[in-house]
Image: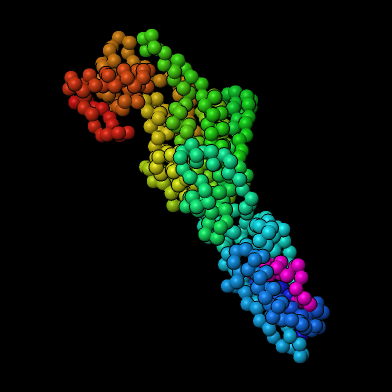
Amino acid sequence: MKYEESPKLELKEQINAEFKKEIIAFANTDGGEIFVGVARDGSITGIENPEAEMEKIGNMIRDGIKPDLTAYTSIECIEDCGKTLICVSVSRGLKRPYHLTDKGLKPTGVFVRHGVSSVPATDEVIRQMLKESDGMAFDKMRSVNQELTFEYAKNTFQVSHIAFDKSQQKTLGLIDMDGYYTNAALLLSDQCGHIIRCAVYEGTGKSSFKTRKEFSGSLLKQLDDTFSFLSLNNNLRATFDGLRRIDYSDYPEEAMREALLNAVVHRDYDYSGSIIINIYKDRMEFISLGGLVKGLTLADIKGGVSQPRNMVIANIFYRLELIESYGTGIQKMIESYAGCGIEPKFAPAPASFVVSLPNRNTVEIASPDPGLSREENILQMIAENGSVTRKEVEAFLGCSSFPANKALTRLLKEGKILKIGSARATKYIIK
């Protein structure tokens, strides 16, 4: 029998420190065999104590390689030229990438077969193996980085009175069945590599900017920091209801909140780029990587249909009460502009999704007739629009919810209007 190294055959005179690397490389590529007791030139040297050596190899596979590779390997003795050899057969594994237990999912711990050599896998090859073997959404896949900390996430969960121990992390999908951190865990960890970039411009274009900010760390930290920044740049316009001052912000707080959450929850994290938020004089733009989930249209999402791209992250945000339910974000943004004469714009593209919130204070908003009472103005408004909501009445009259409710209640008692629908869908029409 002539032995010669090939892409699927490795020769070893004896077991050495490189042995686990060879097994991993075969398991990560196309499988192969390792013959122990054969020199590099193919000459047979044999093994003196095959049983002890076979036990050593078995321990290496069980203790030194992850995920468990025992089902994809076999170890046996063979006789050749009167000498005993050990043949280790390795099949291509289903849970690639396999790696050295003490090195983790890094190029120093993951190897592939290249010609007759076993070489470190690049970060890109490792990511590709994860994607192919897991065959699932990004946030459910194993994270390449397994050295994660969760200081900010722990505090957030503690405030929400939700446990964050290892058992709960498994329930939430942050740790998979094999004990690995998932990409969802990476996104919530302090080591999250994705960032949010914000810029404030002087006018309606990008020729001159006022300030720029970048927010990094856990997605939960990025959400808090970014929303604080957006709130600081959400200017107020003052109106008066008698002696009472009423502040009217450029952008509805609910619209900003939902647009930010939408950008974070639904973006495609396979892309390394950042979420970009641009604030102009007349609008606030949220640019998130990743278009609509396959099969959905803009009409679908406006109608409340939702298919989260990152289901693990969406479920966690739901548990933390950051989102109320799936598919309501777009509708909330639109409803928050009721009575303004303008509404948000949504622009899906193959690799991005843009939400543009118009500045309410840069457009001419319809105003009530000062010669009419609140009730008369409301009746005129309903006559012109067919129906109104309480928020539309507030925006039209420039008042708070109390006087708007008071006027609507009076009209209801006088039998001049009817109330239809319930909760968010409540509207008022002429009787």
**9 or 201: which is nearer to us?**
9
Give the x, y percent position of residue 409.
24, 21
Count of marks, rendered view: 0
Could you tell me residue 430's position as x and y percent?
22, 25
Name above or below for residue 421 compared with residue 104.
above
| On screen, residue 102 above or below 431 | below
Q: In this view, does 226 lie to the left or right of 368?
A: right
Left or right, residue 377 beside residue 96? left
| In magenta segment, residue 46 | no
Q: In which quarter of the image is the N terminus?
A: bottom right
Q: Position of residue 218 (x, y in %)?
A: 58, 41
What residue lies at 66% left-to-right and 61% top-to-bottom? 101
Magenta-tinted stretch: 11-27
Residue 16 magenta: yes
Q: Residue at x 73, y 64 (%)?
A: 119
Quadrant placement of the C terminus: top left
Q: In the orientation shown, which residue stands out farthest toward the bottom? A: 82
Q: In this view, does 255 lie above or below 239?
A: below
Q: How was the colour assigned to the protein in this rendering? A: rainbow
Front residue of 91 and 242? 91
Q: Is residue 66 left or right of residue 429?
A: right
At which x and y percent is residue 358?
Answer: 47, 28
Residue 68 shows up from this direction? yes
Residue drawn at 58 percent across, 41 percent down: 151
The residue located at (37%, 18%) in the rendering is 398
- Residue 173 visible? The answer is no
Dividing the picture into quadrants, the one containing residue 252 is: top left
Q: Relative to residue 155, is residue 131 depicted above or below?
A: below
- 293 or 90, which is in the foreground? 90
